[in-house]
Image (spheres, rainbow, N blue to C red):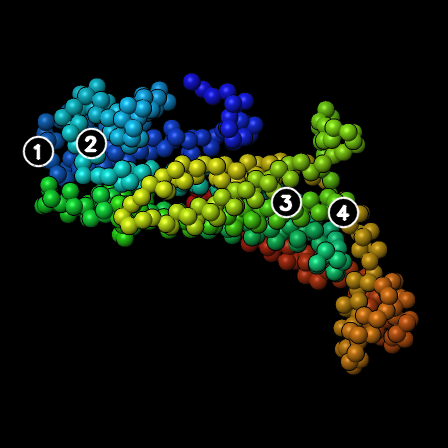
Amino acid sequence: MEIDQLDAITPIDGRYRKIAQDAAEYLSEYALMRRRIKAEITFLKHFITLAEPALVEELPENWVSRLDTIGEKFSREDARRVKELEKRLGHDVGAVMEYLRGKLHEEGLGRLAPFIHFGLTSEDVNNIAYSTMLRDFSQQLLIPEVLEFLEKLSDLAQKHKGSVMLGRTHGQPAIPTTLGKFLANYVYRVAKLAEEVSNHGFYGKIGGAVGDNAALKAVYPDVDWVGATNSIVKQMGLEPFPANTQILPHEGASLFFSKLAVMAGVLSNLCRDLWLLGMLEHVGFSRHEEEIHSSTMPHKANPLMVENAEGCFDLSGELLSYLSRRLLASRLHRDLSDSIIKRFYGTPLTLLLIGLRNLRKALETIAVNVESMRREVDAHQEVFSEPLQLILRKHGIEEAHKIIGRIKPGDMREVLENINAPKEVEQEVKQILAEGYTGYSEKLAEQLLKDAAIIIQRLKQHD
């Protein structure tokens, strides 16, 4: 029975279901079952070839393709059958095994039924299922979403690479820069993190009850099971990890989650900066004609998508950080405390996806007030005290920093008069004022965007 979204306990499956429904193809229980089925079938094919080659002669000629078809056609109705079996058996992987045995008999491959899950432990199946789930979500859904977001942010940065804005340090007026340079910083940072995430390799293992493949070696001693199981793991697109107990140690997943937590943190900070720019009236956020942004103030046009994204990123980052730490703990050769934790992988990952989509939506409606930014710079002439004190020092006035610091903020011409600056100093300052004192901001913005574009192109080719 499909759950009514109004009955959903978490808003991911309720309020925000439509925003990230495609995440279910990677992070739902059905998605996990599909990958368990694939892991079981992949192992079975290789096991029969290695351990029971004589049995192959008794099987239909197309037995391999028929096995593959079972996995490829695994439907939600099939998943419901597995859930019914789990109610009776009380074991999720045991239910998958029972389902596959029945399916083999249905497909005329009953001779293979005794060899389902032969010499394996549940974690041999689960670790492969979870690793491929995370890998596929990252490569097929998350990274493409990051790239779409980066293209929007890059366009905005490129458009405003020369738009002067007042830099602020400690929340106070600092010196001028450009909005494009400020945003280009984020483009580059997120692109670098996306490449780290995209290049992350996932581990897998097949090792039996305590990681030594004792059962397989005991029953089929002539087969090199270490080499064979490593080969199977590689064919699943994973890197074999040799230091196992019953479980695959979680370093690989923990590093992956750590990288995503850092990305979530950077994106959350971008949201806060956009919010502050909105507060300063340097950017605006539009709303649809019938939208209400305040139940009492009709004039309000709030940065709703930015605020929503910030909350998503913050919650996602905290959960990812917790996962990365907690998953490293496992008592001796196995305990089940990580099992329930892994079932919540979808929560922080989907929150990250929702945040990206809502932030991209905000960028599509953002309006930059170039004149407001320029007026703020003009209203804070004191920010040009930095070049003034440096020019004075260049002309031999050692205490220039103190001298300028004692003068009340005001028009630079008044400051120059107060200190009786030499004519050449006045000319140099006027030249700097005319040029805007934004240093290499525009060139740096261009270079950052160029470097980020190269990374983005690599990621597209990798995808």
Location of residue 228 in the rendering, given as x and y in whole percent from the top left corner: 19, 45
Q: Which residue is denoted by mark 4 in the rendering? A: 280
Quarter of the figure that contains the N terminus: top left
Residues tagged 2 and 1 counted as in contact (Cβ below 8 A): no
* 10 Å crowding of disc 1: few (<14), some (14-19), many (20+): few
Give 296 or 363, whichever is nearer the viewer. 296
Residues tagged 2 and 3 counted as in contact (Cβ below 8 A): no
* 10 Å crowding of disc 2: few (<14), some (14-19), many (20+): many
Q: Is residue 440 left or right of residue 325?
A: right
* 10 Å crowding of disc 4: few (<14), some (14-19), many (20+): few
Front position among marks 3 and 1: 3
Q: Amino acid at mark 1?
A: Ala
Front position among marks 2 and 1: 2
Q: Is residue 184 above or below residue 126?
A: below
Residues tagged 3 and 1 counted as in contact (Cβ below 8 A): no
Specify which label sits upstream in the sequence, 3 or 1: 1
Q: Which residue is denoted by mark 2 in the rendering? A: 116
Q: Quadrant of residue 217?
A: top left
Specify which label sits upstream in the sequence, 2 or 4: 2
Q: Which residue is denoted by mark 1 in the rendering? A: 54
Q: Amino acid at mark 2?
A: Ile
The span from disc 2 to disc 3 (Cα, nearest Å) is 50 Å
The span from disc 4 to disc 3 (Cα, nearest Å) is 14 Å
Mark identifier at residue 271:
3
- Per the image, label 2 sits on a secondary structure element best described as loop
- Per the image, label 3 sits on a secondary structure element best described as helix
Quarter of the figure that contains the C terminus: top left
Give 122 or 235, whichever is nearer the viewer. 122
Q: Is residue 412 left or right of residue 274?
A: right
Location of residue 115 in the rendering, given as x and y in whole percent from the top left corner: 16, 32
Specify which label sits upstream in the sequence, 1 or 4: 1
Specify which label sits upstream in the sequence, 4 or 3: 3
